[in-house]
Image (spheres, coloured by chain):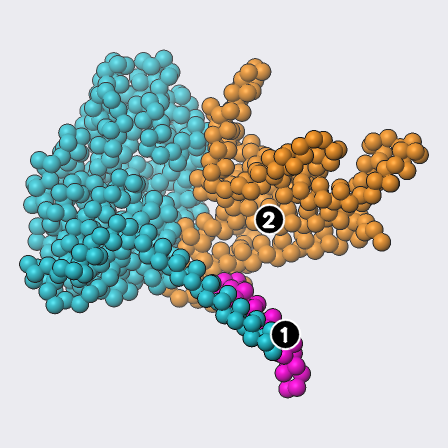
Chain colours: A orange, B cyan
Amino acid sequence: MQTWKRMWARNGVGYLFLAPWLLGLFTLSAIPMGASLYLSFTEYDMFTSPEWSGLDNYVSMFGDDKWRNSLQVTLTYVFLGVPLQLLFALFIALLLNRGIRGVRIYRAIYYVPSLFGGSVAIALLWRQLFGREGLVNTMLGAIGIEGKNWIASPDTAIYTLIILLIWQFGAPMVIFLAGLKQVPTELYEASTIDGAGKWRQFRSITLPLITPVLFFNLVMQIISAFQAFTPAYIISGGSGGPLDSTLFYTLYLYQKGFTHFQMGYASALAWFLLVAIAFFTALIFATSKKWVYYQE
Amino acid sequence: MNQRIRLIGLFAFCIILVFGIAGCGGNNNHESGTNNVSNNDNSNGNAASPDNDAASGAEEAEIRFTWWGDTKRNEVYNAIVDRFEEEYPHITVKREFGGWGDYWDRLATQTAGDNAPDVVSMHQFYVSDYARRDALLDMQTVVDTGELDLSQFPESAIDSGRINDTLYMVPKGVTMPGWAYNTALFDELGVDYPDMNWTYEDFQATSAEIYENSGGEIWGSSDMSGGQLQPNFRYFARQSGEDLFTEDGQLGFSADTLTAWWTMWDELRQQGVIPDAATGTEYENAPLEQNLFVTGQTALHQIPANQIYLYQQQFETGEIHMVRMPQLPGGDNGEYIEGAYLSITKASEHPKEAALFIDFFVNSEQSLELFKVEQGSPANKEMGEFVKPLLDPAQARAVTFIQETLDYASPAVYAPIGVAEVETAFKDNATAIAYGEKSIKQAVADFMSNADDILN
């Protein structure tokens, strides 16, 4: 009793200030999540009350070809797109870090795509860019290559989405840039005296010292890439086509829930996604001891 | 102590700010939901109309009405609702609208959350989902109590809103699908206009002729092998003596019928008479102004008749004419009544007011003067005559077409639960054939087993 009182005396006002946020957490996140966990064990068509079905939803997932396909599409997107995006972000950050003039302006310009890259407008723009008569084909035509409709072809559609992901390199770039600024310049000076070239400096000094930033970016981007929805939804018109080649996991989840009215199954899909993201994040954390270098 | 009081004061201020903002948000929603109603609200408050018996002494009520459509339709329907509110000052109507796809997603979510609008626009393809789940009111109850008058409706039109003898919806407008073409383009290419009662062979021949006479520049039609189950494939199945589904919710057509359907389209595709798969995908969700027909890349286009005038607006030369869906020689008529309907939800707190609104919508000259043939020819016979002089030539052609083909119509089975998923499977397999990923035989086999799984 005493301790409670003392705790309140010390932190009460703090909790009071937290109250609006806590209210949001519970009503907008915690309770809906709990409801979705419950629904994932039921058969629920959104009209009649949910019926308990135990692990049925989770079991039938593994016999669902479209589910397997959507998982594959998403994994391709994440594990091809994110590394390329980070490479690109690092590359630009290195360029901007060379003390060129007007770096603030460049930084702002390169950051802009991240701000609206996930928006509907950009997805629509992408459709135009990679369409049969889009800008990409016009440019290819100029050098004598006949293009095709990249978005409507099953074997290339996913790559247009990956390019869209890479294009949104601004946020990781800014973080890389901050990381690069932290690298002590005397290390470069010392290594120059020792006769190290640019590449050697990058590999032995820059890279090891920015691994914590790389680690952070990797985790954040993988988590967000797993949850990507808008680009695929808009570009394929909600279908995940052609031939399910852009059927992201989240898109399939949406179709199941809101088009086929299988909210129970959709909830199970959502929880599987949560577990999958947690698994890959944990994996990266586990390996981080081996490759992330923290300065003392 | 003093500091604490100041902190608490600050906290109180924060709270007021948060709720203040929330309050603003709420108000905004209200306004956008009710759109241009505010003017009427004022006039209602000041002057209760004395000339209206129904309104005098009645309690204030607010109902919600939702529909699907484009900007043009939103204008028309908002104007109709405004007139209704003038007529019945004690009833306020909040309006919600969206495009076709979003409309059904949202309605399902609202129904699940127990906050569906009172009056909802309905469609044959979805009504059973709602009726079988007991979300809709039996409208006979409001017909019996006199709020809704259906005396001018032909029995067949009323029947088209019944499922298992219960009246779940009444038609705003009745329409029929057909194939549209532009006379100017056919003249230019020197291709004969299609005959009203043409066959699938004629369709193939005409398509091929268009393709040849245009030097391969213009395709016959879009690829209609997949996509939605109705009307195209449904007509074909009905002409073959089958239907999409059986009364007890099983698949109603045979593998042979599906094979014949996909084979016909595949032949057209192989000849290059219809667009390749990638082009089809590219234009799949194109808005009307940008689709293959309007941009002059195809010469025949399958649409519901009520849209003829929308297409006519897109062409400077020529007239948009329409012929029946192609016939199967010696086969049955495929026609069944289609249209846009209105339903009252069972959870509605104001079913009587909702019924008054529907009555106004489908029976009053004030409403029909604006509606004309927006979502089909008015089902009310008197109103059908009333709108005729108001129509432009393209709309008049639509009415003539609908009346002519309505004679062929016979009842159609309602779609069972799971129809959306069956449609996805249908579309997926048709696309797989188009892209050359599956043989027709395999696609048919995959679809049949998939559909069986879904429906059982």
Q: Which mark is residue A139?
A: none
Magenta segment's dominant SS is helix
Residue B431 visible here: yes
Q: Is B215 positioned to the left or the right of B93 in the image?
A: right
Residue A8 vertical placement versus A107 (above, below): below
Query: What's drawn in magenta, residue-wise?
Result: A1-30
Residue type at numbered disc 1: Asn
Chain letter belonging to callout 1: A
- Residue at x 54% of width, y 52% of height: A63
Task: Give x and y (percent) for residue B338.
Answer: 23, 43
Residue B172 vertical placement versus B305 (above, below): below
Q: Dot 1: within a 10 Å radius of its alpha carbon, few (fewer than 14), some, or many (20 or more) residues?
A: few
- Residue at x 61% of width, y 57% of height: A275
Task: Give x and y (percent) for residue A209.
Answer: 80, 45
Q: CA distance from mark 2 to mark 1?
A: 34 Å
Task: Give x and y (percent) for residue A88.
Answer: 67, 35
Q: Label 2, on which residue?
A: A224
Q: Which mark is residue A11?
A: 1
Q: Quadrant of the N terminus of chain A?
A: bottom right
Q: Nearer the viewer, residue B231 or B175?
A: B175
Q: Dot 2: within a 10 Å radius of its alpha carbon, few (fewer than 14), some, or many (20 or more) residues?
A: few
Q: Nearer the viewer, residue B41 or B313?
A: B41
Magenta residue check for B394: no
- Residue at x 33% of width, y 44% of height: B100
Residue A110 visible here: no
Q: Is B370 positioned to the left or the right of B104 in the image?
A: left
Q: Nearer the viewer, residue B440 or B273?
A: B273
Residue type at numbered disc 2: Ser
Q: Is A136 positioned to the left or the right of B63 in the image?
A: right
